[in-house]
Amino acid sequence: DAQTRQASSAAFSGLPSSVLEPLLPEVAELLRSQQPELRCAAALALGFVGKAAQGHVPELVALLQDGSEYAGEMHVQVGGGFRLPVTARKPKCAALIALGMIGAESEIPKIVKELCDESYEVKLCALEALSSLPNAALAASNDVSFLLEDSHYYVRVKACQCLGVLAAEDAMSSLPELFEDKAPSVRVAALEALATCPSIAESFPAEVAKCLNDPVPQVKAAAVTVLGCMGEMGKCYASLVASLLSDPDPRLQAAACEALGGMGEHGAAFAEEIATCLHSSSHYEVQEAAGAALKRLDEPVPAPPLSIYNLEGEGEGEGGAE
């Protein structure tokens, strides 16, 4: 079944060359199997082998012309089961992922071509492959940026993530346009990608600060993180960030603590509020972020409450609540 094939493919990772050498020809032979699911498994196995499988890159490239899809094991979806991963169904997708895992930088033009495929799943795999080749794939950032307008929100998310991994500064200026995307996950991805290039983020402080009014907490938290990485420009928004320390959402509180921790004197002005978070919050992530922020600001770090050790329920079995 699919799980067994996937496990078998992953088993090739880390095998010594003495074991791999006699196996690789047999694996490569499966790339020509009549069964698409076996072609998928063989491609992934070569991907897990890594650079030692460079000699089989041409055979993987040939699979980029394979438009087939394995339609078996549909029973796993009955009753709400998960659909098989695309790399277990589409040989083209498995080949794209494998090319990235192997480090086939010379094949980037062919990978980029798949960004125009009609299938959103193929686009996602092409973006993942480019993300695995960040240094050489930087030149493809303009091609990636075209997918920021794709009709599928998960492609837009992946395109943002890819630009972030590539640190594609020339394409980052397009990200603020997605701050009002209808999909919250796209807004988050755009902000997180912008945070990877603080020098570019500094050009959009007002646009990022506007995201603090977003109704989705994850978007607000991502915006706070961007403001925290903007250097001097971000420090101008310290009071706005500090106002979120009292927000009921722990993710926002933690993000605010982390951002203020990097704002020097501007953040230290709110040391008392950060310390309050450390004591009043029952969430470990907030307490940890608050403690780390106070240390970065060279402020005293009071001992955290016992809740950081999750001891609230201790003793309930003997004489405790029934």
Image (spheres, grey):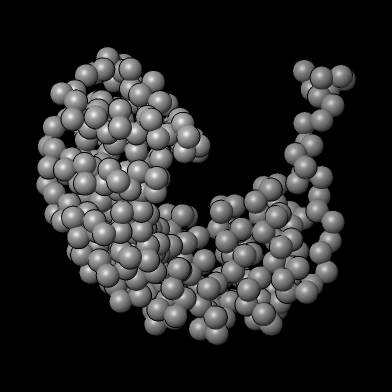
Confirm whether residue 214 shows in the render: no
Confirm whether residue 278 shows in the render: yes
Q: Residue at x 30, y 64 (%)?
A: 137
Residue 78, picture quadrant: top left
Q: Is residue 280 left or right of residue 238?
A: right
**Looking at the picture, how far across and down is residue 178, in whole percent?**
29, 64
**Looking at the picture, how far across and down is residue 97, in whole percent?**
31, 45
Relative to 65, residue 273 above or below: below
Residue 311, picture quadrant: top right
Q: Residue at x 36, y 48 (%)?
A: 102
Q: Residue at x 34, y 34 (%)?
A: 24
Q: Is residue 300 left or right of residue 12?
A: right
Mark count: 0
Residue 150, picture quadrant: bottom left
Q: Which quarter of the figure is the C terminus placed in?
A: top right
Q: Nearer the viewer, residue 58 or 205?
A: 58
**Looking at the picture, how far across and down is residue 309, in whole percent?**
77, 42
Q: Residue at x 34, y 38 (%)?
A: 46
Q: Is residue 281 left or right of residue 172?
A: right
**Looking at the picture, how far across and down is residue 173, in whole percent?**
31, 75
Q: Nearer the viewer, residue 129 or 25?
A: 25
Q: Nearer the viewer, residue 277 or 132?
A: 132
Q: Is residue 86 left or right of residue 19?
A: left
Relative to 252, residue 312 above or below: above
Q: Nearer the viewer, residue 20 or 319?
A: 20
